[in-house]
Every structure is written in structure tokens, then in C-alpha cells.
Image (cartoon, rainbow, N blue to C red):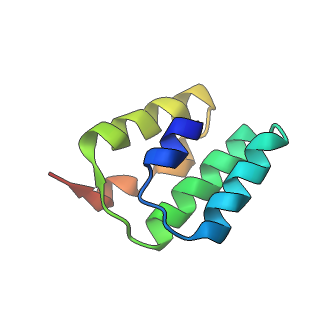
């Protein structure tokens, strides 16, 4: 999860700090949802490989809604 955060297109330090804080308190699913929500809200482009990794984590966390619309942000 840390690797996904570090490789994410997120640039807002407050968001990154929030996600790290949630992770440090064992709130992986909430941290993941927060990260995905901000990627979508800020319309940050993601590549197919990163998207596939997000989908895999969503499956692992049983959180498919987190990545539901991220495919709209795909770039080649």
C-alpha cells in the first residue's frame, strides 16, 4: 500500500499525510479508499499498470467501489 501511495499521482501533502496516518493506524481499507477518491476527485491521470495494481488491492480489501470509476482516468 505504501508503494501505491508513493507511486500515485497525488501531490497534495495533506492528502498524502492523511493516507499515511490512516495506514499507521491499521485502517488500510479507509486509506485506500481515501487515496482512490482523491485521485478521482482531482482527475489525476493513471496508467494501465498502476490501475491494474489498484484493482488488485481493491479485490484484496474487498473494496471494489474504491476503484469503480478510475478507469475514466486511464492514459496510454
Seen from the viewer's position, the closer of residues 17 and 74 is 17
54 over 71 or under it: above or below: above
Task: Check the image and name the residue furthest to the top.
Answer: 60
* Residue 19 x/y as whole percent: 68, 54
Please name the residue shown 74% across and 42% down the image.
23
Which residue is pictured at 35% across the width and 43% down the height?
A: 51
Q: Nearer the viewer, residue 29 or 2?
A: 2
Q: Residue 69, percent across and down?
A: 41, 57
Against 5, residue 35 (above or below) is below
Return the x and y of residue 33 as percentages of the image width and height: 62, 51
Image position of 45 (left or right of 23): left
**Residue depicted at 45% across the width and 73% down the height:** 42
Residue lying farthest to the left in this orientation: 76
Q: Is 23 on the left-hand or right-hand side of 38?
A: right
The residue positioned farthest toward the right in the image shown = 25
Number of numbered callouts drawn: 0
Left or right: 72 in relation to 14: left
Residue at x 70%, y 50% (from the top left corner): 20
Quadrant where the N terminus lies? top right
Q: Looking at the picture, how far across and down is residue 30, in whole percent?
A: 72, 48
Q: Quadrant of residue 26?
A: top right
Amino acid at each position: 500500500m505504501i508503494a501505491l501511495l508513493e507511486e500515485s499521482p497525488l501531490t497534495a501533502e495533506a492528502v498524502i499525510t492523511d493516507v499515511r496516518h490512516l495506514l499507521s493506524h491499521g485502517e488500510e481499507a479507509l486509506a485506500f479508499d481515501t487515496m482512490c477518491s482523491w485521485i478521482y476527485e482531482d482527475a489525476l491521470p493513471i496508467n494501465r499498470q498502476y490501475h491494474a495494481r489498484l484493482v488488485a488491492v481493491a479485490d484484496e480489501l474487498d473494496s471494489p467501489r474504491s476503484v469503480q470509476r478510475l478507469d475514466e482516468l486511464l492514459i496510454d
